[in-house]
Image (tube, helix red, strand yellow):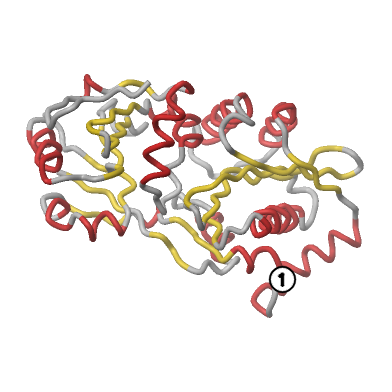
Amino acid sequence: MIRRVMGPCFTFQDFKKIELQDQSSIQAFLRKFPQKISTYTFAHLLSWENIYKLEWLAVSDELLLISCVPTNDDGKRHLLQPIGDFSKEFQETVFTLARGMNYPLKIFDVSQNFCEKYRDFVTLFDLDENRDGANYVYLAKDLAFLQGSKYAKKRNHISQAESGYGWTVGELTRECGPACIKILENLSYPDVPTGTLENERETLRTTMQHFGQLNQYGIMVKVNGQPVAFSIFEELNPSTAVVRYEKANRALRGIYQIVNQETARIIYEKKYCYINREEDMGDDGLRHAKLSYHPATLEPAYILKK
């Protein structure tokens, strides 16, 4: 059921938490107004709802607002980028809301397209480019076939894996949930901020609990019949799939290259042109790994501050 405030006046008290029953309503907005930043799918919002206290409000038939409480901001509620037709009327309402708060309002995960389309609104805020939140976007064909000299090291890792062990690739199902959790929990996370593994475990549990209901897909890779790697992906927009999870047993040389390519092959077969592999969160190792696959572009993410 759509929770809607017909008119330009609203407060954070009008928002409600994102729940499974809201899937069709929120997806309708995201399909009508598809985005390029990986945040904006219903499955992703639902899986992170409890961590970021995500709430939503349809302020008109053409505009969806989502609020959040960042984990490092003392419980202060902010906004994600408005989705839809952000008219002058609603721009003024959001700006009035910002001016009336006793702390600086932030608007997270703002796209380049939004900044260009609503330039007058954006100029009312301080604009920060969040490099840690920039999305890595690849040509699906590149990751599916790993052709050319720039992918020679990736192909070499896979060749060494072929010499060392064999693997099978199967479709991910809801019943794979416990195996996925086990793969995640067996990973080593040196120098990762406290809470990262716990957050990933919680979001993965939510994802697998509702897998099959959320329009997501995935693969499970097994060696000697034992699960060793998995991935989960979904449609972000009609030309792009986004990879949500890609976890593997690091003890197996080449396993990450295998699960990456096997996932890309399926995405390519599904006729997506691009693969969004989300952000690096400022982690140097993750940034190096994502850059090593030679993204076609980095989709910028901005934060507006008032």
Residue at x 76%, y 69% (from the top left corner): 155
Give the residue type at disc 1: Lys
Instruction: Name the foreground residue: 11 vs 293.
Output: 11
Judged from this view, the residue extending furthest toward the bottom is 149
Residue at x 72%, y 74% (from the top left corner): 152
Instruction: Name the foreground residue: 215 vs 221.
Output: 215
Q: Dot 1, crowdedness within 10 Å: few (<14), some or many (≥20)?
A: few
Q: Secondary structure at mark 1?
A: helix
Q: From the viewer's perspective, is 75 left or right of 5?
A: right
> In terms of image quadrants, where is residue 135?
bottom left
* 147 vs 132: above or below: below
Residue at x 59%, y 60% (from the top left corner): 289
Residue 16 drawn at (x, y percent): 32, 21
Residue at x 61%, y 59% (from the top left corner): 271
For disc 1, the marked residue is 153
Q: Quadrant of the N terminus?
A: top left
* 111 vs 216: above or below: below
Q: From the viewer's perspective, is 11 left or right of 242?
A: left
Instruction: Name the foreground residue: 178 vs 193.
Output: 178
Residue 195 drawn at (x, y percent): 50, 32
